[in-house]
Image: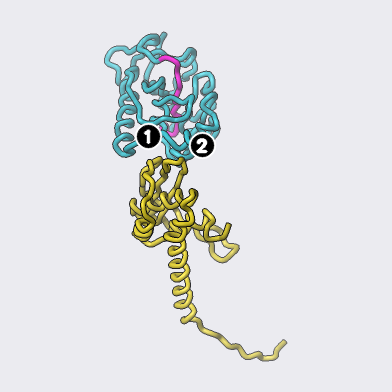
Amino acid sequence: MDNAALQGGFIDPARDAARAFRAGMEAMARPGTIQTLNGCTAPAPMSVAAATLLSTLCDAETPLHLAGTCDTDGVRKWVRFHLGAPLVGRADAMFAVGDWDALAPLDAYAVGTPDYPDRSATLIVEVAALTNTGATLTGPGIAQTATLSLPDGLLAARVARYPLGIDFYFTCGDRIAALPRTTKGAR
Amino acid sequence: MTESTDRKTWLGLLARAPQGRIASLLSQVGPVPPATDLRRPEAGSVMVQGRAGGTGNAFNLGEMTVTRCSLQLPCGTVGHGYVQGRSKTDARAAAVVDALLQTDHADRVHATVTAPLAAEAAARQKSRAAKAAATRVEFFTLVRGED
């Protein structure tokens, strides 16, 4: 097994993971805000923020889908050693990570059931730039409006069927933002 | 490669060793190169599966506590340690032993750590088998000649 796959876990797992969970939760609770998230390093091309979020949220009971450029041999080995998460296709995935072109279309992912809307997929979208410009967001957790740079076509691809739906994280380097299903977006 | 120097065998011996035994044996090896942690010692539980007879279906016997650790020696050799119980010292010692057994120190570590562990495991099994054999009852049946 090569070295990169074994390196890059949390130094102090309990505290680092708690800090990372807080950042991930803040990002989801206040859509449009950009948080800093670091602590773990996965083999390229996965970003630090995505690797840290996966280390925090995934274990052997959360099926994971690696999409597009993230689906490399090195990343697979890293996932196997550090997370132990089963690697699956889109339909069975609880989490999916990759760039937007590789993750789309969205209709293959689980959106939950009316009785259990939490049984839905969370998509971790790797983006080239993450700034507070672009789409205008409104909804719970946003005082007036927020702006966030979203991948082209993402707002159109989201289908409104609340309480069912897919939640998004956007990662770029060590920064993270989120777009939960409750947030309404407009260009 | 003999059976007792096979990696699968020594990992099994380390996993089943009594608490504190690996750490005390490793301290007799002498100076050990400083290892860096890849995965710090962490306790968890694993489901132990059993099978009745040779053909029965697998069933869940119960959960047991296991502590694991992964580390890397300065030379780059990676060692994994899985031990029963929740002793983090033992898990780390087991990982160090696993790593050292893959290096030039293998003979020394084998003589000091794994060979005694193998002897102790064999003695435990023999004593248990002797206790079980003492309770054995022989049944005699008279042939009735009906067939």
For mark 1, give the secondary structure: helix
Question: Is residue B33 something that shows in the picture?
Answer: yes
Camera-nearest residue between A177 and A92? A177
Q: Quadrant of the C terminus of chain A?
A: top left
Start-end of magenta stretch: A115-129
State the image coordinates of residue A167 (x, y, percent, origin top left). 42, 25
Which numbered disc, 2 or 1, marks the residue closer to the eye?
2
Instruction: Give me the residue at 46% from left, 52% from top.
Output: B105
Which residue lies most toward the left here?
A143
Q: Which residue is mark 1?
A: A56
Which corner quadrant of the image does residue A18 belong to? top left
Q: What residue is drawn where x is 36% and y is 49%?
A: B43
Quick check: is A124 in the magenta stretch?
Answer: yes
- Name the one closer to the observer, A172 or B74: B74
Of marks 2 and 1, which one's residue comes earlier in the chain?
A: 2
Kindly identify the amino acid type of the residue bearing the numbered disc 2: Asp
The chain assigned the colour yellow in the figure is B
Residue B103 forms part of the magenta stretch: no
User: What secondary structure is found at the residue carrying circle 2?
Assistant: loop
